[in-house]
Amino acid sequence: MSLSRDLPADIFHIATGSSDPIYRQMIEQVRRLVIGGQISAGDSMPSVREVAGSLGVNPMTVSKAYSMLESEGLLERRRGMGMIVSSMHSGNRGDQQSEAKLELLKPSLQKLAQEAKQLQLDPEPVIELFSNLLKKKD
């Protein structure tokens, strides 16, 4: 069992030019971090004030994201500790976890497919480009 930790406010990265509201971006990032295993059950989320200050956003935006994640069961409120990652979702393994990861990726891929169609690109070079990007070392 891993030890819980205090997560830094910079776990969030906001795309200012995105059409997605900031709270939605935050929700999706937490979902991906939990399913991807980068954050674990029991980890303490940074405070609303820390995140708002780090991102330069209204604290109500952060609070809204946290509340929605709490209602989904991904986060839970602990008295005196703030929000922590729920243990409810830490048990996903194997095929179920892969399906959840792909489901999170689906909206981005749908958007990419739409853009490729608008540019009238053949699927093969788009798939090849995507494959190369996946294999590329950061």
Image: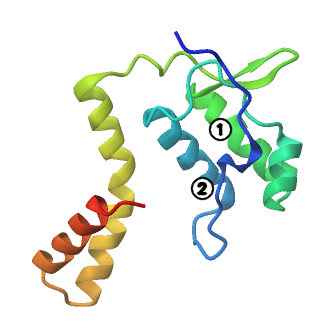
Residue contact between numbered discs 2 and 1, judged by CB atoms under 8 Å: no
Q: Residues within 10 Å of mark 2 (few under 14, many from 20)?
A: some
Q: Can you identify the residue that label 1 sits on? A: 68
Above or below for 21 versus 31: below
Question: What amino acid type is highlighted by mark number 1?
Answer: Met
Is residue 111 shown above or below 4? below
Residue 25 - label: 2
Residue at (57%, 25%) from the top-left corner? 73
Decide if residue 39 is on the left or right side of residue 122.
right
Q: Residue 54's quadrant in the figure?
A: bottom right
* Kind of residue indicated by mark 2: Gln
Seen from the viewer's position, the closer of residues 119 and 67 is: 119
Image coords of residue 58 (percent x, y): 86, 57
Q: Residue furthest bottom?
A: 119
Residue 79 drawn at (x, y percent) = 84, 14
- On screen, residue 61 versus residue 1, left or right, reads right
The residue closer to the viewer here, 137 or 109, is 137
- Which of the two marks, 2 or 1, is nearer to us in this view? 2
